């Protein structure tokens, strides 16, 4: 156990976060997402909700300040509806460490899959919310 690091972050996830460079992306995927179909580096976080992981990861992880959207989610397929509470719960967690990040870009399902193929890693969670997947783009850690 390390001080200052949430106990829900596994050693494997901590290593992945540390190995990522600026511009790399990580997908926090819901329990139904085909993570292993689209990426060979998959980490298991079964039973964990994405909002909780966001709150645990973002104190350790700088979001990319040089892009318009460092946060990306999947748009609803035609005929489906999004539950606005899912995005709200994510933004509530995000705003704890990133109060200036006002929006999340929504992209087409297949564009999301293509980004997943290029992502540094996929974290498979226990999230059951429909369209609950989110991509985080890592930024440059400021020198203090």
Image (spheres, rainbow, N blue to C red):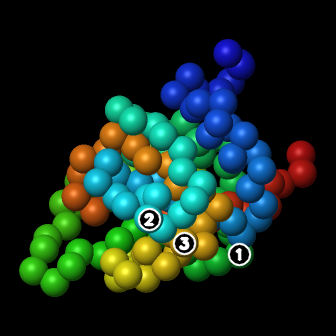
| Left or right of 130 on screen, residue 8 | right
User: Residue 135 in the image: x percent, y percent?
Assistant: 50, 63
Residue at figure coordinates x 40%, y 68% from the top left: 73
Residue at figure coordinates x 60%, y 66% from the top left: 119
Residue 37, numbered label = 2
Residue 117, numbered label = 3
127 and 41: which is toward the camera: 41
Q: Quadrant of residue 57?
A: top right
| Left or right of 66 on screen, residue 122 | left
User: Residue 36 in the image: x percent, y percent?
Assistant: 46, 58
Q: Residues within 10 Å of mark 2 (few under 14, many from 20)?
A: few
Q: Residues within 10 Å of mark 3 (few under 14, many from 20)?
A: some
Q: Secondary structure at mark 2?
A: helix
The N terminus - image quarter: top right
Is any atom of residue 133 visible in this view?
Answer: no
User: Residue 15 in the image: x percent, y percent?
Assistant: 72, 40
User: Pointer 1: what residue?
Assistant: 66
Q: Secondary structure at mark 3?
A: helix
Q: Nearer the viewer, mark 2 or mark 1?
A: 2
Could you tell which of marks 3 and 2 lies nearer the N-terminus?
Answer: 2
């Amino acid at each position: 156990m390390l001080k200052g690091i949430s106990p829900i972050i596994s050693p494997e996830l901590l290593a992945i976060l540390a190995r990522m460079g600026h511009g790399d992306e990580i997908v926090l995927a819901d329990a139904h997402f085909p993570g292993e179909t689209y990426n060979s580096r998959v980490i298991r976080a079964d039973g964990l909700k994405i909002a909780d992981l966001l709150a645990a990861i973002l104190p350790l992880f700088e979001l990319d300040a040089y892009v318009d959207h460092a946060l990306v989610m999947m748009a609803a397929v035609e005929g489906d509806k999004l539950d606005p509470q899912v995005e709200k719960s994510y933004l509530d967690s995000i705003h704890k460490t990133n109060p200036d990040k006002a929006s999340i870009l929504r992209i087409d399902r297949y564009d999301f899959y293509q980004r997943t193929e290029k992502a540094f890693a996929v974290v498979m969670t226990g999230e059951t919310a429909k369209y609950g997947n989110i991509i985080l783009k890592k930024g440059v850690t400021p020198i203090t």
